[in-house]
Amino acid sequence: MSVCSASTRSKARRGEARGPSPAIVSREEWVCIYEEDGEPLPAPTAGREHSGKFLLRTGKELHRELAVEALRVGESLNAYCVHALRGGRGRSGKAKKRARS
């Protein structure tokens, strides 16, 4: 039996739930949703090792744009994307300033 209120479940489904600690409230809300739907909770990820690789589907146009920009700044597509995912930080670790066209 779920300890979640109908109001909490409803707000969680609509993305409206708020609280003093969003991470904890959010986790509790998702547990409620899984319970309500009768779905098993996903396996825990704490302590799991990651390979450092994942497949990302971007679409042809974005792939082309990323490849062109990587060439423009003299990086491999992989290095360029890693830097972009880290928030635009280049090899120096400092945020890059983009030139305006």
Image (cartoon, helix red, strand yellow):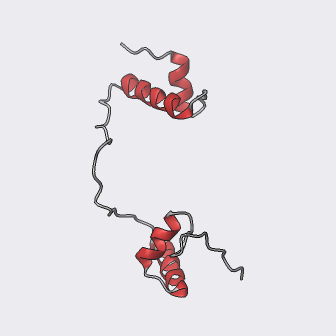
**Rendering quarter of residue 14:** top right
Quarter holding the C terminus is bottom right
The residue lying at 43 percent from left, 78 percent from top is 77
Figure check: 82 above or below 65: above
For residue 11, above or below residue 69: above
Q: Is residue 81 left or right of residue 52?
A: right
Quadrant where the N terminus is found in the figure: top left
Is residue 54 positioned above or below 30 on the image? Answer: below
Q: Position of residue 36 (x, y in %)?
A: 40, 22
Instruction: Return the residue nearer the eye: 47 or 101.
Output: 47
- In percent of width and height, residue 82 lies at 45, 69
Where in the figure is residue 97, as x and y percent of width and height? 66, 74
Residue 67 locus on image (x, y percent): 47, 81
Tell me the residue at 48%/75% (across/down).
80
Residue occupying the point 43% across, 14% down = 3
* Of residues 61 and 44, the one drawn nearer to the viewer in this rendering: 44
Q: Is residue 27 above or below residue 56?
A: above
State the residue at coordinates (50%, 23%). Answer: 9
Q: Observer-nearest residue: 38 or 30?
A: 30
Give the tally of numbered discs. Answer: 0
Which residue in the rendered view is the most extreme toward the front?
Answer: 92
